[in-house]
Image: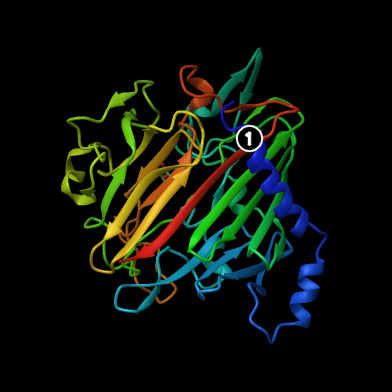
Amino acid sequence: MRTIARLFSAMIFLTITHMSCNNAPNKTEETQAATSSTAAAVTKQDFGQADGKPVSLFTLTNKKGIQVKITNYGGIITSWVVPDKSGGKSSIVLGFDSLSGYLAKPPYFGALVGRYGNRIAKGKFKIGDSSYTLATNNGKNALHGGVKGFDKQVWDAAFTDSVPALTLSYLSKDGEEGYPGNLKVTVVYTLSDDDELGIEYNATTDKPTVVNLTNHSYFNLTGNPSNTILNHVLKIDADAYTPVDASLIPTGVLQPVKGTPFDFTTPTAIGARIAQTGGNPVGYDHNFVLNNKDGSLKLAAVVTDSVSGRKLEVYTTQPGLQFYTGNFLDGSIKTSDGKPINKNAALCLETQHFPDSPNQPAFPSTVLKPGEQYHSITKYKLSVN
Ligand code: GLA
């Protein structure tokens, strides 16, 4: 499959995990505790409990003082505070101050999604002659890994200050949510000094299975979810997208975007044609077929907001990008300071393989076999003009 590791990237990954993957409390944590009065690149604080296990909140700080907070509950990015063009600071992702916000099951805010991000039709697929039935949690379909996907699990965590990097590991047992094979997953978050948030995914299995890992951050570059993202300007390097049926399963067609509301090959305001997208509720919730054909790390999308001056670039090795405009947000979920999170309050750019690939032989394969290494990289780079 096209996500199998290239040697160079795998070496970087091994170096990072070697530095950080000790049993907790690891060397880095001890060092951290001993030197907590000095400026450190990663700090760890208590964030409550889930499934009877302690949950932590990690703060990654780069040399410029930019901070990303990530919890090992669901691998969730809870905040990413950055300056705007006037020097104000705010978080550009939707998130909560406390674990209780996440235990109330918001729609995947900031989370690591797996074992299969996006939908699998009717929760069924075959690998060879073996048929599998998954937990269904989205009408008749399986969505984002099932009833209790990776976004609701407590991951093992280790960190290193030097990068800074947070390594999260999770063993998804054979049969969990209906998926075959014990899947060992490792995700490494890094924050570079030029404000690039890297996410590197690795997985191995002991039985043939399907894997599609992504992060489900909701971005609002104004830093205020009371503003919609309809004035954000988006460019996606995709000449085609995958149209969907009423239950958001791809029809199998790779539809050229030219002449449609899905043409973001030149920068276009998100709200300009959103009313023409169809769907219920109306809005973008579609997989774009990236022009990245060789699986190398390439620029997939750029979002800008002229009010804050912020720009977000998305680089990925993945073949697809789910562009979602928060169509299901309806004000029922509130921010930590009590404001309703309404429709179009944020957008998601989920780097991934295509939805329902296990049932679509013409799509790039998501099958992972024993002896193979699942590997993908996504980087979100933030800058201010
Ligand atoms: C993804 C899906 C959407 C929706 C959100 C979560 O982006 O494509 O349809 O399910 O997750 O609400």
The answer to whether residue 58 is above or below residue 230 is below
Q: Residue furthest bottom?
A: 37
Residue 256 pos. (x, y %) = 27, 26
* Image-quadrant location for residue 176: top right
Question: Which picture quadrant has residue 252?
Answer: top left
Ligand 1 is found in the corner quadrant, namely top left
The residue at the point 60 percent across, 34 percent down is: 211
Q: SS of the residue at dot 1?
A: loop
Residue nearest the viewer, comparing 134 with 233 = 233
How far from the left and from the top, in percent, is residue 343? Answer: 29, 56
Q: Percent from the top left, x then y, of residue 335?
A: 41, 70
Residue 292 visible to the viewer: yes
Q: Nearer the viewer, residue 253 or 43?
A: 43
Quickly name the residue at label 1: 6
User: Does 99 appear above or below 196?
Assistant: below
Number of labelled discs? 1
Quadrant of the drawing holding the C terminus: bottom left
What residue lies at 72% left-to-right and 36% top-to-bottom?
Answer: 204
The answer to whether residue 154 of the structure is visible from this angle is no
* Crowd band around label 1 with a 10 angstrom C-alpha radius: few (<14), some (14–19), many (20+): some
- The residue that appears at 60% across and 48% down in the rendered structure is 200
What x and y, as percent, mark residue 65?
52, 76
Q: Could you say which is closer to the camera, residue 104 or residue 170?
A: 170
Give the amino acid type for the residue marked by disc 1 in the picture. Arg
In the drawing, does residue 204 fall left or right of residue 331?
right
Is 296 rendered above or below residue 384? above
* Quadrant including the N terminus: top right
Residue at (47% x, 57% y) in the render: 109
